DNA sequence: CGATTTCTTGATAGGGATCAAGGTCTGTGG
DNA sequence: CCACAGACCTTGATCCCTATCAAGAAATCG
């Protein structure tokens, strides 16, 4: 099992434009506009919070590089990770002055903050562009929905398997994973908090996955030994990760 | 415990405009435009599917009246309800030619189908309006996220309590619930499929809620006997159901 | 190289699933 | 108007998946 090198840049210079372009075609000037939005990048050390739940939030973030988690901590300390955030993702939406969730950097991250005020400026110039951004943004919803199915109706092994496959597919889409592996500083605790399991049990699940040559967690790397096997175990159908808008909806507009 | 009458219409003539207006101010002409979109309403009998997972889908639906569920059935028959759909909700987005989920009418529903093609026309005329719609639409994400916390980190009683409170709040927002009760054809099976529990166990949870005068399922009606009590049990914080965009983001645009 | 953090293993317990059946209600048709 | 069927609720018994508790390795880090 080799940990082959990735052919994609670790730092995406135009994550937002690239992301949107995955869903909807962008005109050159639109892409350029998106780039200007990301002018002042901010770097977040690993282990630091980008957003704290309950605190005021007047900007959104485009993730340029690095991996983070969006999560929620309950009164009694239980934590639920809502999603793993990867380059190209947009965080901080959902309206409201106060953040509903926290966001933590798992690796060093680079983000481009966009104050709501600036968004308005862009909107004024190119409302159709905003619509495109929002539309691409909305595709994320299916990821959350699938996670719901996970937590509600799948067993622990299925959940872990499904999660590993989902991350493989998502990271492949942005060039951060090869055929069967990807770099990610996952701990079993993180996985347990994402999947609603206990750390102990996640550990036992991994023992099984390992013994069946399905998946391994080595170093800071997820290596999938048997992609079809893991896929089958997870009942994984990647459709939900490749949303498209029929007829290139925006292109037909004059 | 009285089941007071509702002061809101059962059938909302402008669900989409009303919905968007809850989040973002609409100009009169925009509201009018939204109304024209909903011209040809379609009625769905209770128990019928509006959308079937895997089938092609080339339109979106604005729910005008009635309640439905969006759900997903796994290979082996397990079902997970993703969300309860109420008037004003928009269904069918998420892109892709094939529906990822099914949608079933729990009561007779009235929906306004909007072909993607028409959406394009409107977009062409008023791209900013589409942005508003999408933005309001995006607020739904926080509902899904909260459900995730539910399934991942809350006990059975907490889940049921939280769910009942969520529906109370959501239905109040559209005038379909009074202070402490609402009409909804919930079965224990539906609740179990929404919350990832077994029917048997949901039944036992309700026995407890009943005995503590917290909540009742009578007729086709949910009656909450002790709103603060149920709220506390659920650790319910309605913030996530009232998202706002700071500074009336769209209004400042010339 | 001491100190966290993370992983692993073992033992025990419990929340909730599953299985099985009976009861109740509702609508439908004869 | 009654009888029946199907949907829904209830109850009881049992089991098992996964959580908890406890504590020792191993790895990572400053």
Image (spheres, coloured by chain):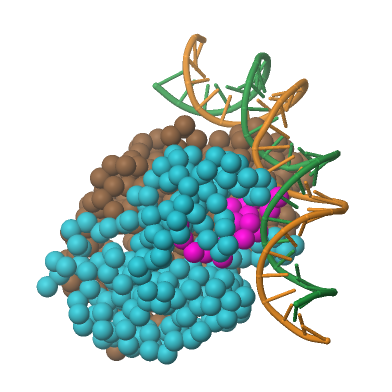
Chain colours: A brown, B cyan, C orange, D green
Q: Nearer the viewer, residue A45 or B236?
A: B236
Asked whether A101 or B106 is in front, the reply is: B106
Point 18% across, 58% down: residue: B247
At x 51% / y 75%, what residue is drawn? B96
Residue A177 on the magenta segment: no
Q: Position of residue D19 (x, y in %)?
A: 62, 34
Where does residue A243 sit, x and y in percent of width and height? 50, 71
Q: Is residue B129 left or right of residue A105?
A: left
Answer above or below: position of A194 versus B180. Answer: above
Give the side of residue A250 with respect to residue C8, left or right.
Answer: left
Within the image, what quadrant is residue B173 found in? bottom left
Q: Is residue B215 above or below residue A124?
A: above
Q: How many discs mark residues in the rendered view?
A: 0
The stretch of residues the image draws in magenta is B181-200
Nearer the observer, A12 or A155: A155
User: Looking at the image, which residue is at 20% across and 63% down?
Assistant: B249
The quadrant the C terminus of chain A occupies is bottom left
């Amino acid at each position: 099992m080799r940990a082959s090198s990735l052919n994609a840049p670790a730092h995406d210079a135009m994550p937002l434009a690239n992301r949107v372009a995955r869903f909807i075609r962008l005109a050159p000037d639109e892409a350029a506009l998106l780039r200007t939005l990301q002018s002042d990048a901010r770097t977040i050390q690993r282990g630091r919070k980008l957003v704290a739940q309950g605190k005021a939030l007047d900007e959104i973030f485009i993730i340029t590089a690095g991996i983070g988690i969006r999560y929620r901590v309950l009164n009694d300390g239980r934590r639920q990770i809502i999603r793993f955030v990867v380059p190209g993702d947009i965080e901080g939406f959902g309206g409201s002055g106060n953040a509903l969730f926290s966001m933590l950097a798992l690796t060093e991250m680079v983000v481009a903050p966009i104050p709501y005020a600036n968004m308005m400026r862009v909107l004024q110039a190119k409302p159709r562009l905003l619509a495109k951004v929002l539309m691409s943004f909305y595709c994320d919803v299916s990821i959350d929905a699938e996670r719901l199915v996970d937590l509600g109706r799948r067993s622990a092994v299925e959940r872990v398997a499904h999660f590993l496959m989902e991350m493989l597919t998502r990271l492949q889409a942005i060039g951060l994973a090869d055929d069967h592996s990807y770099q990610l500083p996952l701990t079993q605790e993180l996985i347990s908090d994402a999947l609603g399991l206990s750390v102990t049990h996640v550990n036992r699940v991994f023992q099984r996955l390992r013994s069946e040559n399905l998946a391994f967690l080595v170093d800071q790397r997820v290596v999938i030994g048997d992609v079809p096997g893991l896929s089958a175990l997870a009942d994984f159908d990647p459709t939900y990760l490749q949303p498209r808008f029929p007829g290139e909806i925006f292109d037909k507009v004059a």
